[in-house]
Image (cartoon, grey):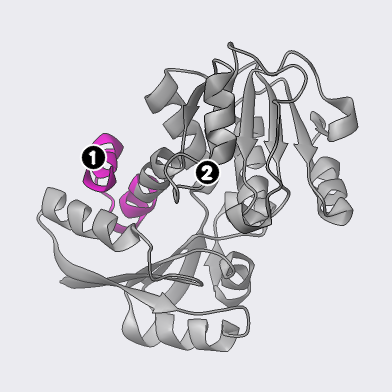
Amino acid sequence: MKWRLGVAGSPIEHSLTPQLHDAALAMTGFEGSSRRVELGPKDQAKLNKVMRKEFDALSITMPLKSFGVEICDEIDEVATHTQSVNSLLVRDGKLLGASTDGDGFVNALRGQFDASPEGLHVVVLGAGGAARAIVDGLVRHGVASVAVHGRNEVRVEELVARYKNVYDFSLTYRPVDLIVNTTPIAGRVEEAAVMQGVGAHTIAVDITYEPRMSAWRALHERSGCASANGLGMLAHQAALQLQWWWDVPIDAAQLLKAIS
């Protein structure tokens, strides 16, 4: 079988996902190719059509992750809980959906920092699809608390209501062991100082990877934090996604090398 792979979203022209797919194909010896598809928030029907006719498996990114839930015949437990999918697969005539973002983030945390989420006090900046997946992954892997700081109060309240140990920002536990920035670069206000409770002991992860060193991440490094951009999460969620597609183990560390 020659796999027809791809990634869909908007903007998509700079996505590194095809490089991850190509690296995984080389690692496994499978045949196939991967391409980018520009699909925006008004293209839900097109996503369904394109997926079923032109691809065997597809990675989807913003703003399509909630749309993916609606077009699938079946979705996995995590996608059901987060109402978000990042992976589509056609199998036995059915369109299946899964979410690997949360577990991908947790695996990146372990791989890059040798850190377990268990018992950590966490702050997540943002309350969109990426934040929902990351919070869900952290909760399932045993964090002590997550404080969500987002501008959309409705989204924050919805996220807080799902879990017993997730709170709005006013109830942040300090010191902060892990801080995660999921907000888009374009909408950020440059900060002059790190928040209270963040210090040299804190791990700071900015899930964006363009630029590789964001102003937010640089600020936290100057404060002594160990930090990372989103390339680790990207590689680790892709490894889980590819394993689901192909039912073979995929080395996330090798994928990370392919895009670093």
Q: CA distance from mark 2 to mark 1?
A: 17 Å
**Quadrant that contains the C terminus:** top left
User: On the image, numbered disc 2 is attached to which residue?
Assistant: 207
Q: Is residue 187 left or right of residue 238?
A: right
Q: Is residue 255 magenta?
A: yes
User: On the image, numbered disc 1 is attached to which residue?
Assistant: 257
Q: Can residue 13 be seen?
A: yes
Given contact means CB atoms under 8 Å apart, are the residues at marks 2 and 1 in contact? Answer: no
Q: Amino acid at mark 1?
A: Lys
Foreground of the two, 4 or 150: 150
Magenta segment, which residues?
239-260
Q: Is residue 140 above or below residue 53?
A: above
- Determine the secondary structure under disc 1: helix
Q: Is residue 9 magenta?
A: no
Q: Which mark is residue 80?
A: none
At x 40%, y 38%, the residue is 232
Q: Amino acid at mark 2?
A: Ile
Q: Can residue 117 be seen?
A: no
At x 39%, y 78%, the residue is 37
Q: Is residue 255 left or right of residue 64?
A: left
**Quadrant that contains the N terminus:** bottom left
Foreground of the two, 212 or 190: 190
Q: Position of residue 27 (x, y in %)?
A: 14, 48
Q: Is residue 201 left or right of residue 149?
A: left
Foreground of the two, 248 or 157: 157
Q: Is residue 109 above or below residue 25?
A: above
N-terminal of the pair, mark 2 or mark 1, is: 2
Q: Is residue 126 above or below residue 226?
A: below
